[in-house]
Amino acid sequence: MYLSKLVLNSSRATRHWLKNTYEVHQRVKAALPKDPRPLYRVEWDQGGEASILVQSFEQRPDWARAFSDLPVLARYQYKVYDPRFIANSWLAFRLRANPTGCRQGVRYPLVREADQSAWLARKMAAAGVEVYQCAIVGRERQATWKGTPDDGRVRMSHLGVTFAGMLKVTDPGLLAKAVRSGIGPAKGLGFGLLSVMPTV
């Protein structure tokens, strides 16, 4: 796998581009045309600088080519990413997810914090870990438009929740699979990337 970090500039073009998650997804795919489903997450630092973390699988990303006609990149870097997990080890984690339920075949957002936390516990248990500490550090509605004005644009809305905390590995194989495949729905729209790192 590869892990990339794209640091964006503070231009008007950047702000306009980030408003439509579908366009962000299309640009990420342009750097990885052979990758079936790269995972990514947009993040903001305290100074208001935006960056995008991208986890990809099938090929080395070509960010210079993908952004050659869109001047939003300040800098970027990528590295080979091959995490190995050990049972009973402790990891810090961060996850921006789209917690949902399903009723009569229709998916709906989980808006109560207690429901979101329960959703996370279920998903993480299935991913081979136990959550010991967790905080919700971000929550927002995300709008996405598909199509063009000529074709008829379709607006979608997703609830984004960012979780951060500490977990214990119970099944290294399940965790490795979850890191590769992501957590929860709407992965193509910037949700589901599970970032983990050893605790000090």
Image (tube, rainbow, N blue to C red):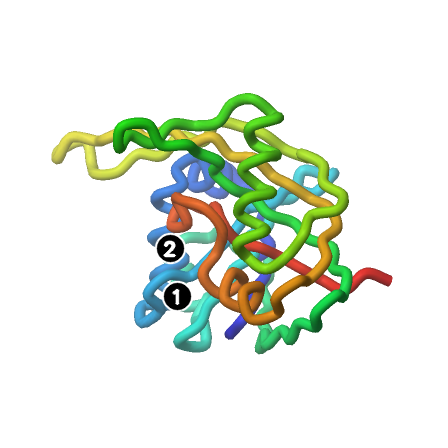
| Label annotation for residue 31 | 1
Looking at the rendered structure, the secondary structure element under dot 1 is helix
Q: Which residue type carries mark 2?
A: Arg
Neighbour class for label 1 at 10 Å: few (<14), some, many (≥20)? some
Question: Front-most of 153 and 191?
Answer: 191
What residue is rendered at 55% in x and 44% in y? Answer: 122
Q: Estimate the x, y position of residue 129 in percent, counting from the top left.
A: 64, 56
Q: Report whether 47 appears left or right of 98.
A: right
Between 45 and 182, which is closer to the camera in this rendering? 182
Whole-percent x, y for residue 83 in the image? 62, 73
Q: Are marks 2 and 1 in contact (CB under 8 Å)?
A: yes
Instruction: Give the labeled residue for mark 2.
Output: 27
The number of callouts visible is 2
Q: Which mark is residue 100?
A: none
Quadrant of res 86: bottom right
Kind of residue at badge 1: Ala
Direction from residue 190 to residue 102 in the image, left or right = left
